[in-house]
Image (spheres, helix red, strand yellow):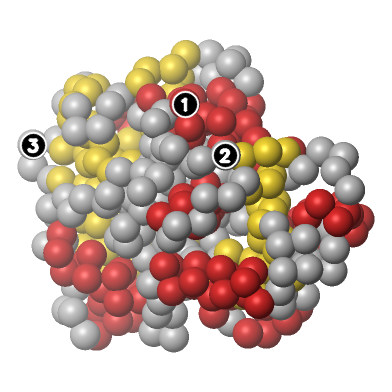
Amino acid sequence: MTFLNHQLYIDQINTYIDPMVPRETAIITHGHADHARFGHQKVIATPETIAIMKARYGDNCAQEFRPLPLRQTMRMGEIDITLYPAGHVLGSAQVLLNDGQTRIVVTGDYKRGKDSTCADYEIVPCDILVTEATFGLPVFQHPDPRVEIQKLLQSVNNNPDRAHLIGAYALGKGQRVIKLLRESGYDKTIYLHGAQRKLCDLYQAHGIDLGVLENVGNRKKSDFAGEIIVAPPSAIKDRWSRRFPDPVIAMASGWMQVKQRARQKGVELPLIISDHCDWNELLQTIQDTGAKTIWVTHGREDALVHYCQTHLGLEAEPLSIQGLGEGEDE
């Protein structure tokens, strides 16, 4: 038995990690809707995640906020709580729980690839690793996102009379795509669906330079020839998309590696850009942490659990926590 149960609840201090329903005290790993919910009495999170929650749900989305900056420790009862970078989105954090005998790390969602819009993932040694497995199958091997961005820029160059409409989730993916474009030398105005604006402004307020951004507004269709527009995935299939000249429909997601999914969504230009670990990165993380016990919260749990048991000789089990992984951060 450990002080953390399979619902990510710590009985000693009456605290949950990323609970699906309102709780008295919740540690929140990041601001995506399948992890950060409205209505908790007390929220413990990084200052950036708290800012994101307030921007999305309102200043009163929790009764009390206790900001915990990365690498600082808060003691609750007999347990030390420290947050470390998860590399997923701005403010995302792993949770280290330490009672002096057992070190448990709950990763939340995380990635190990470079991303200039958030702090890089850090390895945190532990006894028990509680990991996600969104892309927990050997088939998932994420390419370099810079190569995917070059595909986009090449398409823009080859289609000067068409707009390029990129489906990207409003928190994290949209800002990452924009930043990758800037780092690849694209300095033109990038146009935004209105739903992208608030969080892009929040990122810029936290020092993430995204260059010149403008809302789509009521411009003429011809004004968008040769331009790049970033919108939520739902908008690229909506009437809203008809305002653009013969748009090239693109989607930025790790799931774009699955060609059938791209076809089902009507995506002409799939961009395999993920904010999660691929299979090899999951395995590398498990080995790097030195954990002897692995719990898998959500995703392709069975494959990762089986591999840990049969190939790595580790204790492993799926938690299959309902609600996690049903969000917006592919």
- Image quadrant where residue 260 sits: bottom right
- Label 3 vs label 2: CA separation? 49 Å
Query: On screen, 130 above or below 18?
Result: below
Q: Is residue 106 above or below residue 58?
A: below
Q: Provide the secondary structure element on which disc 2 rests.
A: loop
Q: Which of 323 and 85 is in front in this view?
A: 85
The amino acid beneath tag 1 is Ala
Q: Is residue 307 left or right of residue 273?
A: left
Decide which of tag 3 and tag 2 comes sooner along the chain: 3
Q: Name the secondary structure under disc 1.
A: helix
**For residue 205, which numbered disc appears in the image?**
1
- Please rate how many residues cluster around mark 1, counting C-alpha atoms within 10 Å: few if below 14, some from 14 to 19, many from 20: few
Which circle marks residue 212 in the picture?
A: 2
The picture quadrant where one finds residue 282 is bottom left
* Rendered residue at 64%/69% (across/down): 156
Nearer the viewer's eye, disc 2 or disc 1? 2
- Residue 181 higher or lower than 191, as above or below: below
Q: Mark 3 points at which residue?
A: 100
The kind of secondary structure element at disc 3 is loop
Against 310, is 226 above or below? above
Q: Can residue 269 be seen at all in this image of the molecule?
A: yes
